[in-house]
Image (spheres, rainbow, N blue to C red):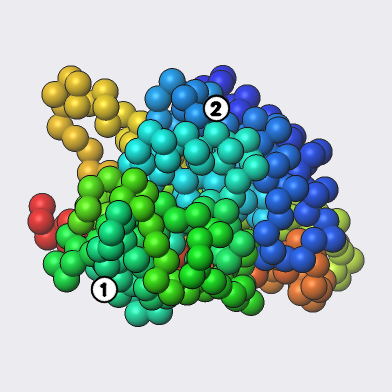
Amino acid sequence: MALDVAEQQLYDHTLEVCRSQLAPLVEGAAHGELNRPVVRAMGEAGLIARLFPTSVGGVHDGEVSAIDLCLLREALAIENTSVETALAMQGLGSYPILQSGRPEVVERWMPRVCDGSVIPAFAMTEPSAGSDAAAMKLRADKADGGYRLSGTKIWISNAPDADVYTVFARTSDDGSRGITAFCVPGDSPGLSGRALDMLSPHPIGELTFDGVFVGDAEVLGEVGAGFKVAMRTLDLFRPSVGSFAVGMAQAALDAAIGYTSTREAFGAPLADMQAVAHRLADMAVAVHTARLAVHEAARAYDRRAERAATGATPENLTILSSMAKACATEAAQRVVDDALQLHGAVGLEVGHRMEQLYRDVRAPRIYEGATEVQRTIIARSLYRR
């Protein structure tokens, strides 16, 4: 489905802002480190505001459009993956606060997330609880006026230097129904962490909770309903992981077209070789197909309220999101690998655009539900039909 005029303008504007204002702030910075100047610049440019409603300094009357989120993430990924993940983490880490926080908690954090002066994080994964979130062990024990959190979170984006964390902890042993979400300031006594050296364009770390006190007012949503809080956020952001992958794949395809058009071998440009041209054609088909899957899932998410109001049969957003993420992330891995092959040794030089893409494209196949988990979700739906 083609973009409308406003969507195309958003896409083009984001590309230009990233190219002229944001990407230069990443040059020379260590890969995978928290880059506050980039986040502040995105706030000043109004890009972060595209994620949020007007009530907290954003631009939307209600919830963010999922297709807008996908367009933002794809456009930024084409130009710079570090900038893209910085924007994505502003949304992922704070949406549970926006959607489920008490008014005073929302007022304390969300306007500053929106303007880029506060950096949030989404803390769910644990050493023994990744895709199986119901297996988490971090405890939240009831105390006078609140809870005390004890345990470990690992592979948390923006940790250990985020200003505020959405933390999911166990308040009872009742499986997924025993999980509660909390808003935890990054400077809370008893909270410590360390950075992890990962293949990622954004910072990732480990957090240790040593009896960290969190007041009753910092509970996000209802006690025991933390899994629902998480899913409300992931249902919105999971298709856009696919758009991040599509952006990287498009960047790799563009680079491969440019390189093979000028690089000569055996007296002619590489592009004149049928094997090269056909590989590029297959790459283009893969990028286009993945983009369509992502956009279908995003538009289905945006239609959900309209369909509910008209009594239309609801679309299965979970299945569409799983298909989009699996399709796009797997396709991006293949496209980037093919583009690197066409570049040859030059693409392996540290700092080369292809080397960066090859390094950054791998993680999205794992986080926010590994491909194998998405396939399981899809397969189960086939049998339910």
Q: Amino acid at mark 2?
A: Gly
Residue 354 location, x and y as percent? 72, 64
Vertical arrangement, residue 361 with respect to residue 348, above or below: above
Q: Secondary structure at mark 1?
A: helix
Res. 245 in view:
no
Residue drawn at the location 23% of the way across and 44% of the way down: 316
Quadrant location of the N terminus? top left
The disc at residue 135 is 1
Q: Nearer the viewer, residue 239 or 222?
A: 222
Residue reaching furthest to the bottom: 128
The disc at residue 321 is none
Residue drawn at the location 74% of the way across and 35% of the way down: 17
Residue 181 location, x and y as percent? 32, 55
Q: Secondary structure at mark 2?
A: loop
Which quarter of the picture shows residue 20?
top right
Q: Crowding at label 1, few (<14), some or many (≥20) Cα neighbours within 10 Å?
A: some
Vertical arrangement, residue 360 with respect to residue 322, above or below: below
The disc at residue 57 is 2
Residue 126 location, x and y as percent? 39, 74
Res. 214 in view:
yes
